[in-house]
Amino acid sequence: MQKTIKIISWIFILSGIALLTIGSDRLPDFYNPGYMAGSAFASALAIMILAWFFKSEDPRKKKARIELQGFILLALALNAVGALGLYKLYLVGFEYDKLVHFMTPLILVLGAVRFRMVWYGRDIGSALKWSLGVVLAGAVGWEIFELLSDVILGTETMGLYGEAVVRDTIIDLVMNVLGAVFATIIVIFYKRKKVEKN
């Protein structure tokens, strides 16, 4: 797992370099090479930074950190393949963007709950509350970031390439909440199963 994380981190870095060097005239017209390269570099950093700040010889803690890196990697990969073209599926009636807005909080809440429990010794309830708060705040923060990016950098990250912005943003936030709710159900189900076993 750790080796896979390193390989994919390097794929993000190399993808960023490629986006900056290939030339926009040779890329699909909906690509924004500078923005996408920055996102690729930020994704690699987001995966690797946990290993820099959370070091431990404790096998359980190390495993929990690697698992969280894997969860973050999965969420970033879903977003990355969307940016590379799968978001265009809305043209045939499938809004891939909404799937990502559902799956990302679900994945991150599950990863954060386990990490919080192992690293900080929190019970499952408090770990869940903390994870929900951080992930949902991050979801709102992402929408604000997209707005600022569109205004300052001239990107078209909000709405469907700049169209139907309000409707799309509301649905994105609803899907974020639904993903977090589904993660909560999974955690509660896991907790009950654990209690039944004991």
Image (spheres, rainbow, N blue to C red):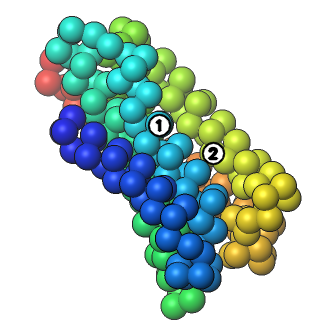
Please give the residue where the numbered disc 2 appears in the rendered image.
139
The residue lying furthest to the bottom in this view is 92
Q: Position of residue 35 (x, y in %)?
A: 63, 58
Q: Determine if residue 102 is in view.
A: no
Q: Is residue 27 above or below residue 186?
A: below
Q: Is residue 141 left or right of residue 60?
A: right
Residue shown at 21% from the left, 9% from the top: 58
Q: Is residue 182 left or right of residue 83?
A: left
Residue 152, compared with residue 56, is above or below; it is: below
Q: Is residue 163 above or below residue 112?
A: below
Inspect this view and state whether residue 128 appears: yes
Numbered mark located on residue 186 in the image: none
Front: mark 1 or 2: 1
Across and down, in percent, residue 54 comes to 38, 16
Residue drawn 67% across the image and 47% down it: 142
Q: Going 69% across and 64% down the picture, which residue do you hit?
A: 157
Q: Residues within 10 Å of mark 1 (few under 14, many from 20)?
A: some
**Residue 78 occupies quadrant:** bottom left
- Quadrant into which the C terminus falls: top left
Query: For the residue marked with disc 1, what is the amino acid?
Result: Leu
At mark 1, the secondary structure is helix
Location of residue 104 in the rendering, given as x and y in whole percent from the top left corner: 47, 50
Image position of 189 (left or right of 103): left
Looking at the rendered image, the quarter that the N terminus falls into is top left
Asked whether 64 or 41 is in front, the reply is 41
Residue drawn at 53 percent across, 43 percent down? 42
- Mark 1 to mark 2 CA distance (whole Å): 19 Å
The percent coordinates of residue 14 (x first, y second) are 39, 54
Amino acid type of disc 2? Answer: Ala
Residue position for label 1: 45
